[in-house]
Image (cartoon, rainbow, N blue to C red):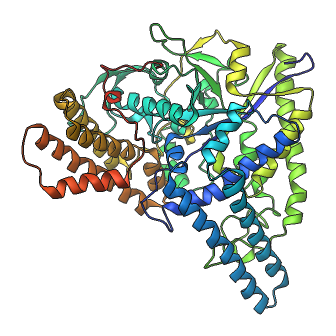
Amino acid sequence: MSSETIGSFTFVLHAHLPYVLAHGRWPHGMDWLTEAAAETYIPLLDALNELIEAGHSPRITLGLTPVLCEQLADEDFKAEFGDYLTQKIAAAEEDYKTFDQWNREHLSRLALWWRDHYRHIKERFENRYDREIIGAFRRLQDEGYLEIITCAATHGYLPLLGLDDNVRAQVRVGTQSYRHHFGRQPRGIWLPECAYRPAYAWSPPVETPALPKRAQRLGVEQILAENDLEYFLIDSALLKGGKTVGVYIERFEALRRLWRQFESQYQERPEDKQKTPRQAYLVGNPMEGKKPVAAFVRDPHTGVQVWSGEHGYPGDGWYLDFHKKHFPGGHRYWRVTSSKSDLAEKQEYEPDRAAERIPENAKHFVGLVKKILKEYYDQTGKKGILCAPFDAELFGHWWFEGPQWLSQVLTSMAQDPELELTTCGRFLDKAQPTEMISLPEGSWGQGGYHYIWLNEWTEWTWRHIYDDEARLAALLGEFASKPDQKLTDILTQAARELLLLEASDWQFLISTWSARDYAELRLVEHHQSFERLAAMAEKYGRGEWIDPGEWNFLGECRQRDKLFPFLKLEWFTASHPATSG
């Protein structure tokens, strides 16, 4: 950091989708993945490469979840994505014919604009990135332009998992998946939903005979340290107290209704003004022989400018509206107009006018970052960091102009002598934090706690999770030492089904009502698959006859849910602690 700088900045983008391969297409399933690839991942790669070609290093911190990496690297996805892009091009051409017949000149031009847009995405995917989205991100990291971090295997909600061994497995698989895809040890991790739990005597929040009523649990940071992870991210309220504003509550009416049930129970922690999001802290109880793990803190001031569709940049009336679509192709031809406009009031989108709004929004954001960092520098004499974490899919998918906005923000910052673009790992190396703190339990949901993932609508899901966690632990205790490949195959697939069952996405989708039926179906499907495989393992392990139909079922599960081919059962047991090898 030069003497001119007042502080450092990094975007932390969290790219994640649940496992949808072979689990439906539209309206829920594979289309989620293909849409995100077309609308976020390829445009993000384009924006980063354009910055590099202009002589700048974007230095973002990018989280790619293990379950997302598995899907983007899968040959089935690549074939499906190519077909999807071809369909989007054809749909735009059909729209052109329709609008031309209607004598809608502007909409006709927009249809051709969409056709060319998807042709560009298809060309980039097939030629520039050689159908390897993960490989393209890996090259940018290998060349020093960004830092990629990992996540829990299937985005399991770690504070509510019933056994430490299952938290261990989620983190261990996450680190090994990262090694598999990126060829190195990850330095940081995005905790799913930024959810953290310290060490204490924990009781299951849902009554179940499967788990002890009270058990001493490790802190999440201790399990991260076991896996040689160096840092994670938290919400500012976990650090400082004060009011917690959830990142999702504005987007989903169901969450606002749900929050009203919990709001009366919520007690705001007094704000600790001695702590600041401008620095990193060491957390909790270090593991013997391991370095303590650091926490970076989400900046509370800049977030609303980017998250909010009502008060932030995505709500600009000239930007593309997310909700109104023209069917059957699903292309969007209308602009936000105003945050209060209903779908009937949306006016036609004008790409050139939208592009004119991006520089102003980018300039405002850069100015806000500089103001915050300068105030901290003037008050303390220290050069702090502003860490801006967002879901990656916000940029491009939810907010179509988001990747161009990101590019302009990063270009302005790269050219500003008062700011240093960095990554969390680079800042950690320079800052070498020494202050050790304790953190309360919580997440980045409204109120800072777990209510989005644990409520009257989702309690039943946790009973299934806890029952299956306990049953897998018992099976491993009884059979894991047996050197039998068929038994290992059964138990390994059962472990995969448990990992998929544990995904926090299902509770989120239930609570937001955004894809509730799909989420409930997936939960039940993975639970029932686990139960059937567990029963099969018990019978086979005890020498009983297995019906051929059961072997066929195992084969179907292995074909359908084939993620993490490197999965090892020992990662689910405390007797095999993680090593850096």
**In the picture provided, is 217 more to the left or to the right than 431?**
left
Q: Nearer the viewer, residue 25 or 75?
A: 75
Rendered position, 38 above or below 546: below
Which residue does the image show at 60% across and 79% down from the upper left? Answer: 328
**In the picture provided, is 319 more to the left or to the right than 148?**
right
Whether residue 104 is visible = yes
Location of residue 122 in the rendering, given as x and y in whole percent from the top left corner: 69, 62
Q: Image quadrant for the N terminus? A: top right
Rendered position, 475 above or below 281: below
Rendered position, 120 above or below 52: below
Identify the image quadrant of residue 425: top right
Whether residue 397 is visible = no
**In the picture provided, is 200 more to the left or to the right than 530?**
right
Q: Nearer the viewer, residue 173 or 516?
A: 173
Location of residue 65 in the rendering, given as x and y in whole percent from the top left corner: 54, 40
Location of residue 324 in the rendering, given as x and y in whole percent from the top left corner: 67, 71
Which residue does the image show at 81% across and 18% down from the upper left? Answer: 383
Location of residue 474 in the rendering, given as x and y in whole percent from the top left corner: 20, 32
Query: In the rendered picture of this protein, how many numbered marks are placed on residues?
Result: 0
Which residue does the image show at 93% across and 19% down from the upper left? Answer: 4
Q: Nearer the viewer, residue 174 or 107?
A: 174
Identify the image quadrant of residue 470: top left
**In the picture provided, is 155 more to the left or to the right than 109?**
left
Which residue does the image show at 55% across and 18% down from the upper left? Answer: 293
